[in-house]
Image (cartoon, rainbow, N blue to C red):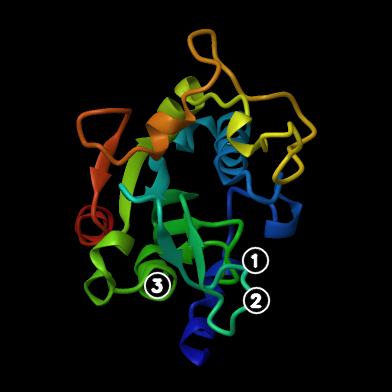
């Protein structure tokens, strides 16, 4: 754990966002939490929006292990999600990851996030290896839409309480969340990368 604490100084640096516990957040709605972060940048630092990217993390099996997640009851904080969404920022301090669900620093350097939260894909069975759909922040704000139907049970009740604000939708789309989660290279918006490709391009 000491190695993780060594990167905590990054969270004390100046940020375009308020403190983590002051950000708009709803548990299990990571795609909307990140949309709200992008919207904050657009409203308060519009010239910076071009330096932000949304990362959808998933795979064909929709089984992705992530470590150091707050919701985990395990000592290593391992969770198996169907997908997860974080925000990436390229700036003078380096490439930063903003993950509202991690116990790692907010923000965390990309290479540290890969090391501690993603870990080495080569040590995992193929069904658990992660891919990243990388979407520019402005594109995400203009195209993402969700009617939250993926969080409804068969009886109409919610798997997790939804955000209090209205669903995020555009003139063209009411619900295209599945297109962002999909890791098919010939579909959706943005680019699909492996962890090593992500590091090579952005770190």
Dot 2, how many residues are within 10 Å of its Cα: few (below 14), some (14-19), or many (20+)? few
| Residue at 25%, 37% in the rendered image | 184
> From mark 3 to mark 2, how far is it between C-alphas?
22 Å
Q: For residue 112, which numbered disc appears in the image? A: 3
The mark lying in front, picked from 3 and 1, is 1
Q: Nearer the viewer, residue 14 or 49?
A: 49
Q: In the depicted view, which residue is nearer to us: 126 or 55?
A: 126
- CA gap between label 2 and label 1 equals 7 Å
Based on the displayed image, in which of its 4 quarters is residue 136 positioned? top left
Look at the numbered disc 1 and give the secondary structure of its residue: loop
**150 to the left or right of 191:** right
Identify the residue under disc 1: 71
Q: Earlier in the sequence, mark 3 or mark 2?
A: 2
Mark count: 3
State the residue at coordinates (74%, 37%). Answer: 163
Q: Secondary structure at mark 3?
A: helix
Q: Secondary structure at mark 2?
A: loop
Q: Residue at x 74, y 31 (%)?
A: 156
- Provide residue 38's location: percent of width, then percent of height: 55, 37
Q: Are marks 3 and 2 in contact (CB under 8 Å)?
A: no
Which quarter of the image is occupied by the C terminus?
A: bottom left
Name the residue furthest right: 164
Query: Residue 101: x, y in percent?
Result: 60, 60
- State which tag comes first along the sequence, 3 or 1: 1
Q: Tell me how far mark 3 sits from mark 1, CA to CA.
A: 20 Å
Q: Is residue 50 visible?
A: no
Q: Which residue is mark 2?
A: 73
Q: Nearer the viewer, mark 3 or mark 2?
A: 2
Image position, residue 63 (x, y; %):
40, 57
């Amino acid at each position: 754990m000491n190695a993780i604490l060594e990167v905590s100084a990054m969270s004390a640096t100046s940020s375009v966002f308020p403190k983590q516990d002051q950000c708009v957040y709803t548990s299990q709605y990571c795609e909307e939490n990140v949309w709200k972060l992008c919207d904050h940048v657009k409203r308060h630092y519009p010239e910076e929006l071009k330096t932000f990217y949304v990362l959808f993390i998933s795979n064909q099996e929709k089984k992705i292990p992530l470590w150091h997640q707050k919701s985990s009851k395990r000592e290593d904080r391992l969770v198996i999600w169907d997908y997860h969404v974080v925000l990436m920022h390229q700036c003078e301090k380096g490439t930063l990851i903003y993950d509202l669900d991690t116990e790692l620093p907010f923000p965390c350097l990309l290479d540290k996030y890969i090391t501690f939260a993603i870990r080495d894909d080569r040590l995992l069975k193929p069904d658990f290896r992660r891919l990243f759909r990388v979407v520019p922040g402005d594109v995400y704000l203009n195209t993402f839409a969700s009617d939250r139907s993926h969080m409804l049970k068969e009886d109409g009740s919610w798997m997790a309480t939804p955000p209090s604000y209205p669903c995020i939708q555009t003139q063209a789309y009411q619900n295209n969340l599945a297109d962002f989660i999909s890791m098919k290279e010939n579909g959706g918006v943005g680019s699909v990368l492996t962890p090593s490709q992500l590091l090579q391009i952005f770190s």
